[in-house]
Image (cartoon, coloured by chain):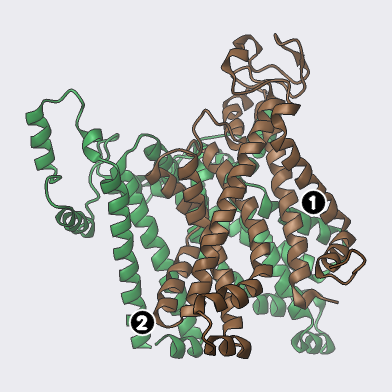
Chain colours: A green, B brown
Amino acid sequence: MLGFVIQRLIQASLVMAAMSVIVFVGVYAIGNPIEIIIPPEATQEIREATIRSLGLDLPLWKQYFIFVGNLTEGDFGRSFIYNLPVLELILGRLPATLELVLISVISATVGGVVLGIYAGYRPDSIIAKTIMAVSVLGFSVPSFWVGLILILTFAVNLGWLPAGGRGETVSLFGVQWSFLTFDGLSHIVLPALNLAFFKLAMMIRLARAGTRETMLTDTIKFARAAGISEGRILRRHLLKLISIPIITVFGLELGSTLAFAVVTETIFSWPGVGKLIIDSIAVLDRPVMVAYLILTALLFVLINLTVDLVFAFIDPRIRAKGA
Amino acid sequence: MSASDTQSPLRLFWREFSENKFAVGSLVVVVLLAVVAFLAPLLVPQDPYNLELLSLLDARRPPGFVGSGGYVHVLGTDPQGRDLLSAIFYGLRISIIIGLAAGAIALVLGTIVGIFAAYAGGWIETVLMRVIDLQLSFPAILLALVLVALLGQGKGQLIAALVAAQYAYFARTAYGAAKAERRKDYVEAALATPLAGYKVAVRHLLPNCMPPLIVVATVQIANAISLEATLSFLGLGLPVTEPSLGMLISNGFPYMMSGRYWISVFPGIALIILIVAINVVGDQIRDQFNPRLRK
């Protein structure tokens, strides 16, 4: 087991090293940062002094090591636009994204499992077919379009819910949260629905497939023969049996939902990390782009590492194969 | 093969396909939209790229409005005074071209990488597939977003970003199929002959990878169209001079709040019909290739 853990840790570090090279080359070497930092009307002396003070006159590999050295100390540079340390900027936006993502993924999972079990339990009923049709739509319709329709329906036409922003927030542990106020909650409903739609479709499919398979197994036959009520079979036995893939996907989806939040946050003007990165790309705020890329890569590497390790812990065969 | 030969695989395939009326209908829709897109210049009342034909007096008019051109704007006009129907037909054209180009390049690239990995084996296989798996664990939208940000805007850059975000799906599929085939005796036998290795790969491994690759290709073309629309909606896709469906939707978004729904909604409906129809066709092909679902 220890060998496996070490091997995976080395792999994860290699990936992060590769990512840092790609990001560095992509952001700093392809585009010329000098053009952006130094105003065109600057004199030759000022140009040279700035280039030297930023270390841009050093050979590329030296610049890369300085870049990595700063990263490991948590120094991602300062945003050109906000003139704040980038890390501070991103951490300040993180709670908004986190609450949106968590609410979406949790509600999609709960709703998807309930609907999926029903669709798998009575596959031929009209309700089950409707549920499946909705899940097909959830897979094919682009998420920004769902967002637009939600705004058009609930904000513009019906006027029930606000179309953008975070609403009123409350401070808890020194951080602002929307979900603790009624106004904030009403602001979070539409973006959360938008973000949850695709995940809901996926959870429905997983739960339905699991239910259909499990209902045919001996476990359920014996449970029925023992006279256990159907409701109890579904709640106590079926749920347990279909939960493993659902928990796995739940973990993996947390990461990809963070990525999709970029689109949702832009549509609903939700002031999270996703909105920040889109705004930064638009104005070429390179330090923010770099920090976002590195942190997202780190997040995905950590998620993958955790999944690998959890599986290895559960299933000894993977451990033997991997080491 | 004679026309009366009803046992030809293609005919059998079509017979099975035609049993699903919904899939046939979707196929008709896809073909129809493709025809509309490619004949757009002949079908529309206005060339949406010709700025001289546009008048701001016609901007943001509702469906059915008769503009300064003297014809009815069936679906209304956009913020620049463009006839929306014309803009949608041209937008469809751009979306389909981008989807097909990105899908085709990703198919070729992914297939080469996948088959090469399965054929080469050893450390090459390990490294290549580890990279592919890693890439698959990142959401395609994020990869495309990052690449567009790094490469800048333009048709070529956009296609490159879409290919980079999607080729891994093809590589994984081709690898799986080729790997299964690679172990079979006839491939070993072919490799034992003086025949060059790449010929074995092309003649024997490649044809056996085709069925799953076709399925992935249909889905990925729909995904490419959807991704392009998303990027254009975020303002990171094509330049403003080439309005794809995503950009048309994005142009109308600010006016939605004031009730001018048509500028966003009609291009969106065109986009959804296109994507859903391609997906339904892809689903049917997948079911037909899936041996477990065979009666």
Q: Nearer the viewer, residue A142 or A187?
A: A142
* Image position of A48 with respect to B130: above or below: above
Judged from the image, the secondary structure of the residue bearing numbered disc 1 is helix
Chain on which label 1 sits: B
Q: Residue at x 14, y 52 (%)?
A: A59
Mark 1 to mark 2 CA distance (whole Å) = 50 Å
Task: Find residue A259 and report its horizontal and vertical position in percent.
Answer: 48, 53
Residue B154: % across, % down: 46, 38
Q: Amino acid at mark 1?
A: Leu
Secondary structure, mark 2, is helix
Q: Is residue A76 above or below residue B2?
A: above
Image quadrant occupied by the N terminus of chain A: bottom left
Classed neighbour count for the residue bearing mark 2: other residues with Cα under 10 Å, few (<14), some (14–19), many (≥20): some
Outermost residue toward the front in this view: B194
Seen from this angle, which residue lies furthest right? Answer: B4
Q: Which residue is mark 2?
A: A5
Instruction: Tell me the residue that label 1 is attached to.
Output: B27
Q: Nearer the viewer, residue B204 or A187?
A: B204
- B14 or A305: nearer the eye? B14
Q: Which mark is residue B109?
A: none
Q: Amino acid at mark 2?
A: Val
Q: Nearer the viewer, mark 1 or mark 2?
A: 1
The residue lying at 75 percent from left, 63 percent from top is B285
> Horizontally, is B262 left or right of A93 in the view?
right
Horizontal side of residue A187 vs B40, given as left or right: left
In-front residue for pair B176/A93: B176
Q: Residue at x 60, y 76 (%)?
A: B205
